[in-house]
Image (tube, grey):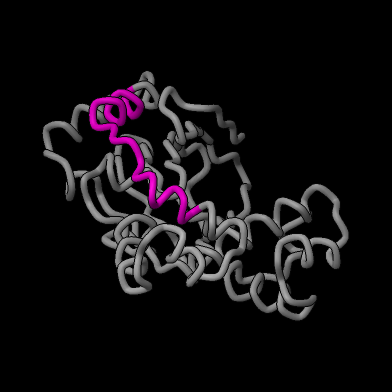
């Protein structure tokens, strides 16, 4: 059973799940986010993914996490996002081992312990990079985003890597995928999904979904 709620910090979602008996492999789509996860007494960072990841764990496993919205996690951890791209990294590789042990031992309420850690280390997101993410989500060309944010294309790329874990074009592809999947899951026809999300045509939609998610869009809707 998966559940989530708004965390005590802005731009952060607290979530939890327990793996039921007979659970199928879960497909975790790239979303531009960074997660801090407690899993049965171990704590790790799940970085921003460029393609879907397949999640497997024994039945009964418990997961508690904080999902940091696009660009907000690196400030809390004090490490550039591209250090974690497509990786799961033990938290004690970033923070002091004693602090991580206390967090790992919070078996009664892992979410509260995760939120307290994030609260102590909270940094407000860079406003320029918030604007970059908004531009990418709106489908604006990279050159337009750079101009509006007062950055050269090279500066934009470098800052996107450290903030989001990948460059602006990849960020835009991933955010567009999230929009398309959300629309499809609300029952919108695929032709409408493609045009609304900003794909050139149905073939473009199909190629991009398969490349990023690993399966056709129809497999993500059921």
Query: Compared with residue 210, is residue 90 higher up or lower down, i.e. above or below?
Result: above
Q: Is residue 50 visible?
A: yes
Which residues lie in the magenta part? 113-133
Question: Does 114 sit above or below residue 35?
Answer: above
Q: What's the residue at 44%, 48% (across, down)?
A: 130
Q: Quadrant of residue 64?
A: top left
Residue 60 drawn at (x, y percent): 50, 37
Q: For the stretch drawn in magenta, what is the main secondary structure?
A: helix
Residue 32, percent from left and from top: 47, 55
Q: Quadrant of residue 191?
A: bottom right
**Who's the residue at 48% across and 54% down the image?**
133
Considering depth in this image, is 134 or 28 the residue closer to the camera? 134
Figure check: 222 above or below 64: below
Q: Which is nearer the eye, 58 or 207?
A: 207
Q: Is residue 4 magenta-colored? A: no
Quarter of the figure that contains the C terminus: bottom right
- Image quadrant occupied by the N terminus: top right
> Quick check: 208 left or right of 136?
right
Q: Nearer the viewer, residue 134 or 71?
A: 134
Q: Which is nearer the eye, 120 or 198?
A: 198
Give the residue displayed 39% in from the left and 52% down from the top.
129
Asked if residue 104 can be seen in this view, the reply is no
Whether 126 is among the magenta residues is: yes
The number of discs equals 0
Left/right placement of residue 39 relative to residue 131 reads left
Say left or right for 158 vs 4. left
User: Residue 196 at what x, y percent from top left?
Assistant: 77, 60
On screen, 74 above or below 12?
A: below
């Amino acid at each position: 059973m998966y559940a989530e709620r708004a965390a005590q910090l802005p731009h952060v979602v607290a979530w939890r799940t327990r793996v039921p008996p007979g659970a199928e492999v879960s497909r975790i789509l790239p979303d531009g986010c960074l997660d801090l996860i407690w899993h049965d007494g171990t704590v790790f960072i799940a970085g921003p993914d460029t393609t879907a990841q397949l999640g497997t764990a024994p039945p009964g496993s418990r997961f508690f996490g904080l999902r940091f919205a696009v660009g907000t996690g690196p400030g809390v951890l004090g490490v550039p996002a591209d250090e974690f791209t497509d990786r799961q990294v033990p938290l004690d590789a970033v923070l002091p081992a004693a602090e991580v042990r206390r967090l790992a031992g919070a078996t009664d309420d892992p979410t509260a312990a995760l939120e307290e850690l994030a609260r102590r280390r909270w940094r407000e997101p860079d406003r320029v990079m918030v604007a970059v993410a908004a531009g990418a989500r709106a489908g604006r060309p990279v050159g337009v985003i750079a101009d509006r944010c007062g950055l050269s294309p090279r500066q934009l790329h470098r800052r996107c890597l450290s903030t989001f874990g990948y460059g602006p074009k990849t960020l835009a592809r991933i955010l567009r995928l999230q929009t398309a999947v959300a629309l499809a899951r609300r029952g919108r026809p695929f032709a409408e999904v493609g045009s609304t999300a900003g794909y050139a045509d149905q073939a473009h939609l199909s190629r991009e979904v398969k490349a990023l998610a690993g399966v056709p869009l129809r497999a993500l809707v059921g």
